[in-house]
Image (tube, grey):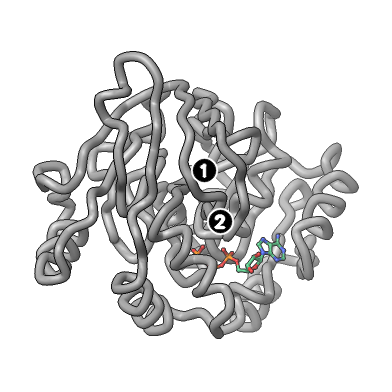
């Protein structure tokens, strides 16, 4: 297994990275492993091994996968993954398995699929990114010790305080201008933990879906949650979808999350889809 590298994010993969490493070392002789302390560390590692490695396996959450994907776009290198984050939305959607034997057999077969990625003002997103309420949730969540229960706590607290944000489109789409609870851009169907914000998204169709979510009354929250986890948001009267390959708009907040990572992005916002720009291990 000379042309494979394993990049472990010790922050997202806290709970299971030691057992992953033990399993790996007992199955593979001398694997090329990098324990990454930062995204710049990952980038340097990929640069240093780019010529000799064909498949880069990221062990972590969606943020880790995205940090590796960034270096592999439009190249012949393949991205694989071992899900070890809190949400694992992208990993789940592309069937990255938590079974190490399955991963090793995929590596052996070296089969790949070319999928879309997109950018928001030149920042890469491979899964679901957004602004408004969930941008604020991610910002606050990053100040906690993470985990699903903290995510739920922060979500509820933020819901009561959060004021909808104004979004402005030009031309024909101006009819959608107005205030929204959140605006999500979805390459795949889900945030993570099977929360399907955009049940019809397809990461191979050359399009991204913009999910415009209107503020709903608190009593509707369990219905919204039920619909989201059941993949039935498409028919909710509070959500409107726009499918697009490229779009510009402006929002009155800089608080975004990119695949679950907090980031400040200034409007105007320019979204572009890059069809078949990333090879993933299948
Ligand atoms: N390549 C990397 N090396 C080191 N740290 C990283 C890397 N990529 C992201 N991080 C940081 O690690 C933390 C966890 O990231 P990650 O998104 O992988 O896990 P998660 O948030 O638990 O999972 P998910 O996004 O699936 O919910 C974040 O603070 C992020 O900034």
Mark 2 and mark 1 residues within 8 Å of each other at the beta carbon: no
The front one of 194 and 176 is: 176
What SS does tag 2 mark?
strand
Q: Residue 62 versus residue 236: which sits nearer the camera? A: 236
Confirm or reject: label 1 Cβ below 8 Å from ligand 1. no
Q: Position of residue 242 (x, y in %)?
A: 29, 29
- In the rendered image, the vertical position of residue 77 relative to residue 47, given as above or below: above
Can you identify the residue that label 2 sits on? 81
Label 2 to label 1: alpha-carbon separation = 13 Å
Q: Nearer the viewer, residue 233 or 238?
A: 238
What residue is drawn where x is 41% and y is 60%? 134
The circle drawn on residue 71 is none
Rendered view: 140 above or below 63: below
Q: Position of residue 239 (x, y in %)?
A: 20, 44
Q: Horizontally, is 174 left or right of 274 in the view?
A: left
Residue picked out by circle 1: 126
- Element class at badge 1: loop
Q: Vertically, is 10 above or below 270?
A: below
x then y, percent, for residue 213:
26, 48
- Label 2 neighbour load within 10 Å: few <14, some 14-19, many 20+: many
Q: Does residue 144 appear to the left or right of 46 in the view shown?
A: left
Q: Residue at x 75, y 58 (%)?
A: 39
């Amino acid at each position: 297994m000379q042309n494979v590298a394993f990049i472990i994010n010790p922050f997202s993969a806290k709970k299971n990275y030691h057992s992953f490493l033990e399993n790996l070392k007992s199955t593979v002789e001398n694997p090329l492993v990098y324990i990454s302390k930062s995204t710049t560390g990952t980038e340097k590692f990929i640069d240093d091994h780019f010529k000799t490695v064909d498949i880069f396996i990221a062990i972590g959450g969606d943020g880790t996968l995205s940090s590796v994907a960034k270096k592999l776009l439009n190249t012949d290198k393949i991205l694989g993954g071992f899900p070890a984050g809190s949400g694992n939305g992208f990993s789940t959607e592309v069937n990255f398995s938590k079974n190490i034997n399955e991963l090793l057999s995929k590596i052996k077969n070296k089969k790949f699929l070319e999928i879309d990625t997109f950018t928001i003002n030149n920042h890469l997103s491979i899964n679901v990114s957004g602004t408004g309420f969930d941008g604020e949730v991610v910002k606050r969540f990053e100040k906690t010790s993470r985990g699903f229960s903290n995510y739920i706590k922060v979500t509820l607290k933020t819901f009561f305080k959060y004021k909808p944000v104004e979004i402005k489109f030009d031309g024909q789409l101006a009819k959608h201008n107005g205030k929204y609870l959140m605006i999500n851009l979805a390459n795949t169907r889900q945030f993570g933990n099977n929360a399907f914000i955009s049940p019809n998204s397809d990461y191979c169709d050359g399009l991204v879906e913009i999910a415009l979510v209107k503020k709903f009354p608190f009593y509707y929250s369990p219905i919204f949650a039920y619909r989201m986890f059941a993949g039935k948001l498409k028919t909710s009267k509070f959500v409107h979808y726009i499918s697009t390959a490229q779009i510009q708009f402006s929002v009155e907040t800089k608080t975004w999350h990119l695949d679950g990572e907090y980031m400040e992005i200034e409007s105007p916002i320019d979204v572009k889809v890059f069809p078949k720009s990333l090879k993933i291990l299948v």
